[in-house]
Image (cartoon, grey):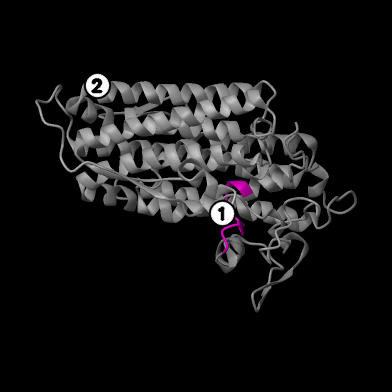
């Protein structure tokens, strides 16, 4: 999804004496890369736990094994969402990210859908392809043998077929859809309600093609694990992402600020939060099948703060930390650092209120509902906090005399365009 770009730049650093001893830029980049490696390693480990839960569901479908697989999916999202702050500024991550976290998706590409729902996208001829039901499929003028559903089929042929971003065949959200099914409740209470019998072999199978559905779920989960293993390796000592980051320290600092600003402003505040409220559309909900969007938003916000403070708490409770971007900014202008720290705390707190409200019974898609003034207030408070945070990131850019290019969103920059 293309977004307007906002340039945040400063040609010269602020003049005056340094206020504190700054760490070396290389030390800050080392910490940043260590945080990335730990975050992706945790994402891999939790995806492997999801893989085990999926195998158990397929081997013995039941309400218990389905719920266990869903719980494993939710747990796997916690570390992954905190890695999203490494997007936007790192080309290796940007080129890879669409394989694991692309959304929204035309889920009818994968499996059966309610024909009266928003899944019927007349602008996408593959929106109702239904690979689960069809061992022979046609993409464009090419007939494809899909008798065996494999990671290679999903990642090499189906994903973003015909160059259409909504043709999402892989990643967390494909797995999410296969575990929960469609959420047909609109902005009312309730998530997807796929029954475990959708995975029963033979008698009792619901939805048809239960063996192929299981094969798709298995292939998508295995591919997710492989993709995360690739990215975790990219941040190891000799990995491509770490090597590229360290090759140019000045560009590395710019990459950190670009990632923080782009996730904070255009992606999270704009495309993932504000846009859905403007349209009152649950189809704009990031984790729309599971109704776990509040967790995605919260951990995205936490990830931005992690990067600035140079500290990440791993799934096992251990902490990875070191010289940080905050230390660099503090040395250049303590007031800018103090304000940015406060704004980061403010956004995490506002997103925490959204999380608490959802856990208390008002899911994010309900907050989007027309006339839900309490829900709109929660959403707008988070958006305002993220915008304020981005302005402080801009001041940090100026204080360091560097530059950052931050993605925007029509929902924030040109609201009238949203309704055109």
Image height of 252 relative to 212, above or below: above
Residue 317 occupies quadrant = top left
Left or right, residue 370 beside residue 341: right
| 77, 122: nearer the viewer | 122
Residue 15 occupies quadrant = top left
In the picture of the structure, the residue carrying the numbered disc 1 is 223
Image height of 51 relative to 154, above or below: above
Left or right, residue 321 beside residue 317: left
- Magenta stretch secondary structure, dominant: loop
Which comes sooner in the sequence, label 2 or label 1?
A: 1
Residue 279 pos. (x, y %): 63, 42
Magenta span of residues: 164-173
Q: Which residue lies most toward the bottom here?
A: 141
Packing grade of label 1 (10 A; few <14, some 14-19, many >=20) is many
In the picture of the structure, the residue carrying the numbered disc 2 is 335
Task: Judge whether residue 167 is colored magenta.
Answer: yes
Q: Residue at x 67, y 41 (%)?
A: 282
Viewer can see residue 358: no
Disc 2 on helix, strand or loop? helix
Task: Judge whether residue 400 is colored magenta.
Answer: no
Packing grade of label 2 (10 A; few <14, some 14-19, many >=20) is few
Residue 321 occupies quadrant = top left
Q: Which residue lies most toward the right here?
A: 203
Question: Depth-wise, is mark 2 or mark 1 nearer the camera?
Answer: 2
| 267, 135: nearer the viewer | 267
């Amino acid at each position: 999804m293309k977004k307007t770009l906002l340039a945040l730049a400063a040609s010269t650093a602020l003049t005056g004496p340094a206020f504190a001893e700054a760490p070396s830029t290389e030390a800050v980049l080392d910490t940043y890369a260590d945080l990335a490696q730990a975050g992706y390693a945790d994402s891999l480990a939790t995806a492997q736990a999801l893989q085990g839960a999926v195998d158990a569901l397929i081997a013995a479908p039941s309400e218990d094994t389905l719920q266990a697989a869903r719980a494993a999916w939710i747990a796997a999202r916690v570390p992954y969402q905190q890695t999203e702050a490494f997007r936007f500024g790192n080309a290796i991550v940007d080129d890879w990210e669409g394989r694991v976290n692309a959304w929204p998706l035309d889920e009818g590409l994968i499996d059966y859908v309610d024909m009266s729902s928003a899944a019927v996208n007349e602008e996408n001829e593959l929106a109702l392809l239904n690979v689960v039901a069809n061992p022979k499929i046609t993409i464009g003028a090419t007939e494809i043998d899909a008798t065996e559903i494999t990671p290679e089929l999903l990642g090499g042929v189906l994903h973003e077929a015909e160059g259409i971003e909504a043709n999402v065949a892989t990643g967390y959200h494909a797995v999410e859809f296969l575990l929960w099914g469609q959420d047909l409740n609109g902005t009312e209470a309730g998530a997807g309600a796929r029954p475990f019998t959708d995975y029963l072999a033979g008698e009792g199978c619901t939805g048809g093609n239960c063996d192929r559905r299981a094969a798709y779920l298995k292939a998508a989960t295995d591919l997710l694990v492989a993709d995360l293993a690739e990215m975790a390796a990219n941040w190891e000592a000799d990995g491509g992402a770490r090597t590229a980051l360290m090759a140019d320290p000045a560009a590395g600092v710019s990459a950190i600020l670009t990632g923080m600003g782009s996730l904070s402003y255009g992606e999270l505040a704009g495309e993932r939060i504000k846009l859905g409220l403007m349209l009152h559309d649950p189809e704009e909900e990031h984790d729309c099948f599971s109704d776990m969007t509040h967790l995605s938003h919260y951990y995205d916000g936490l990830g931005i703060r992690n990067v600035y403070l140079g500290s990440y708490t791993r799934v096992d409770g251990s902490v990875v930390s070191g010289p940080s971007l905050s230390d660099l900014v503090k040395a250049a202008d303590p007031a800018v650092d103090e304000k940015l720290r406060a704004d980061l705390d403010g956004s995490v707190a506002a997103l925490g209120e959204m999380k608490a409200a959802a856990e208390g019974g008002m899911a994010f898609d309900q907050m989007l509902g027309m006339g839900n003034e309490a829900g709109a207030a929660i959403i707008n408070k988070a958006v305002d906090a993220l915008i304020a945070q981005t302005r402080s990131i801009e001041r940090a850019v100026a204080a360091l005399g560097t530059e950052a290019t931050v993605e925007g969103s029509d929902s924030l920059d040109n609201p009238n365009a949203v309704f055109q």
